[in-house]
Image (cartoon, rainbow, N blue to C red):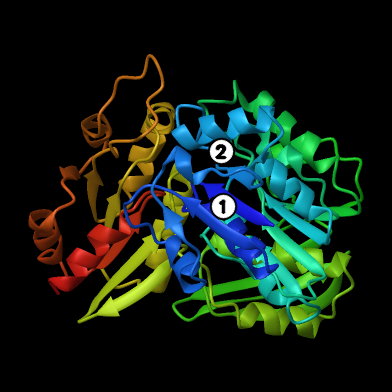
């Protein structure tokens, strides 16, 4: 069967396209010309990527449409016309993925923060137990021929994750986001509650999170966290430049000791969620210890490079809470170095709604530099701000361009830890800064 992906470079779409290809199907797709890091696994599989053109849409195709697209795109318009005539099959990304989930023992990872890393961790651990496929929001996906488990990142935007009815799930946390869609926290929490109650076998929940605790969950579940009222609890936590260590209690009884090569509260919580899921699945401590200790990380999640005494960290952080924990983790790992934060916004509504919190967290860096909104950033009616508005709220922020002049200026601020944070392509500026050092 021939599958065609409209918006194939999208993080979820690229992952899904590679999975369909790995299932020995014919795959192609289209997107903008601009290079995006997610296209690397597509190119490695020699999956054709075309310009948008309605002539790419052929009868008999199965067409998957990325959630960022609508009928203003010529290919989407053509696909919808042919679908009405019964000449093609058309699916939105989340609907197609929802069907795929039914073919495997599925583990769905939801939550405001930590989805990508937790999905990567689970798939890495489960691969030691049984053939495991995965779909991660860093543009990577894989499905072995004999795949038994399927671990997928599940985004709550516009309630898309309600298309999935997995066997198991994790909810990593709940903190209001996507304020262009959700009316308030109650509306946001309701989406997660609906998701939790359509999980078929069992779900693990971050019990230190007040909003998670407010969910009325009927599905079999375990709570995990650092507090005493959790089913799975981390105690004796130690963090330093080398990583972290902690003991795990299950129902107050000792389960095992863990020593992991990464730092930061989010990675501690994510690891504990994976351990809780492993306990629910009956995995032995040694399997979880070895799997987590060897976890290599995922793309654009606290990805570290070093050169001539400088450290470059690339991270997807685009919410004030994520910014907070990235700066904290950088200080734990590099306690004696200057921290320079470079942040590029994505959605106007997110910056508008959380502006004071963004300013508060960005001020925790020693120096802060802000990039302009992307030209294609979603701009909701009634919101009229620029990046200078955020800079004015910060104590010591400066607005910069993403060009060689700015890169040279940043390079001259070293030696330092450069923390590049954005859901957009800020890694390109990182590469230019690095070239000057």
Q: Residues within 10 Å of mark 2 (few under 14, many from 20)?
A: some
What is the quadrant of residue 141 in the picture? bottom right
Residue located at (57% from left, 44% from top) = 58
Residue located at (55% from left, 49% from top) = 5
Q: Secondary structure at mark 1?
A: helix
Is residue 265 at least partly visible in the picture? yes
User: Furthest-top residue in view?
Assistant: 382
Residue located at (70% from left, 67% from top) = 23
- What whole-number distance in Å separates the C-alpha atoms at marks 2 and 1? 10 Å
Residue 323: x and y in percent read 42, 50
Residue assigned mark 1: 12
What is the quadrant of residue 340 in the picture? bottom left
Most foreground residue, 160 or 354: 160
Mark 2 or mark 1, earlier in chain: 1
Most foreground residue, 74 or 255: 74
Give the left or right position of residue 145, taking residue 380 as reference: right
Is residue 136 at least partly visible in the picture? no
Residue 367: x and y in percent read 22, 54
Tell me whether circle 2 and circle 1 mark residues in contact (CB < 8 Å).
yes
Residue located at (37% from left, 30% from top) = 348
Give the quarter of the figure containing the C terminus: bottom left
Residue 254: x and y in percent read 84, 76
Q: Which mark is residue 153?
A: none
Most foreground residue, 327 or 41: 41
Q: Which mark is residue 67?
A: 2
Residue 1: x and y in percent read 69, 57
Whether residue 328 is situated above or below residue 390 in the rendered picture: below
């Amino acid at each position: 069967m021939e599958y065609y992906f409209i918006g194939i470079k999208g993080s979820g779409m690229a992952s899904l396209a590679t999975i369909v290809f790995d299932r020995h199907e014919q795959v192609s797709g289209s997107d903008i010309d601009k290079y995006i890091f997610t296209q690397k696994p597509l190119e490695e599989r020699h999956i054709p990527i075309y310009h948008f053109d309605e002539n790419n849409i052929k009868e008999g195709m199965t067409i998957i449409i990325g959630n960022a697209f609508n009928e203003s795109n010529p290919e989407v318009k053509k696909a919808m016309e042919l679908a009405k005539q019964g000449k093609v099959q058309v699916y939105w990304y989340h609907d197609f993925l929802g069907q795929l989930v039914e073919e495997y023992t599925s583990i769905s990872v939801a939550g405001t923060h930590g989805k990508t890393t937790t999905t990567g961790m689970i798939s890495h651990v489960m691969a030691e137990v049984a053939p495991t496929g995965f779909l991660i929001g860093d543009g990577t996906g894989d499905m072995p021929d004999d795949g038994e488990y399927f671990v997928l990142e599940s985004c709550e935007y516009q309630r898309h994750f309600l298309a999935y009815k997995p066997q198991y799930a994790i909810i990593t946390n709940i903190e209001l986001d996507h304020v262009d869609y959700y009316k308030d926290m109650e509306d946001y929490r309701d989406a997660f509650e609906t998701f939790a109650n359509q999980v078929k076998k069992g779900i693990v929940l971050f019990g230190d999170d007040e909003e998670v605790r407010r969910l009325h969950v009927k599905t079999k579940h375990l709570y995990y966290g650092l507090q005493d009222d959790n089913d799975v609890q981390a105690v004796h936590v130690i963090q330093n430049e080398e990583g972290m260590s902690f003991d795990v209690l299950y129902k107050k009884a000792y389960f095992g000791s863990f020593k992991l090569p990464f730092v930061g509260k989010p990675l501690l919580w994510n690891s504990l969620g994976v351990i809780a899921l492993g306990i629910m699945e009956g995995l032995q401590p040694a399997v979880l210890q070895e799997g987590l200790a060897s976890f290599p990380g995922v793309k654009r999640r606290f990805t570290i490079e070093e050169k001539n005494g400088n450290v470059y960290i690339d991270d997807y952080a685009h919410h004030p809470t994520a910014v907070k924990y990235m700066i904290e983790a950088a200080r734990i790992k590099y306690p004696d170095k200057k921290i320079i934060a470079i942040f590029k916004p994505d959605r106007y509504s997110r910056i508008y709604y959380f502006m004071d919190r963004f300013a508060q967290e960005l001020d925790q860096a020693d120096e802060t530099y802000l990039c302009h909104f992307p030209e294609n950033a979603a701009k909701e009616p009634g919101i009229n701000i620029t990046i200078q508005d955020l800079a004015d709220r910060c104590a010591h922020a400066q607005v910069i361009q993403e060009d060689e002049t700015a890169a040279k200026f940043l390079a001259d601020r070293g030696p330092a830890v450069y923390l590049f944070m954005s859901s957009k392509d800020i890694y390109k500026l990182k590469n230019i800064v690095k070239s000057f050092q």
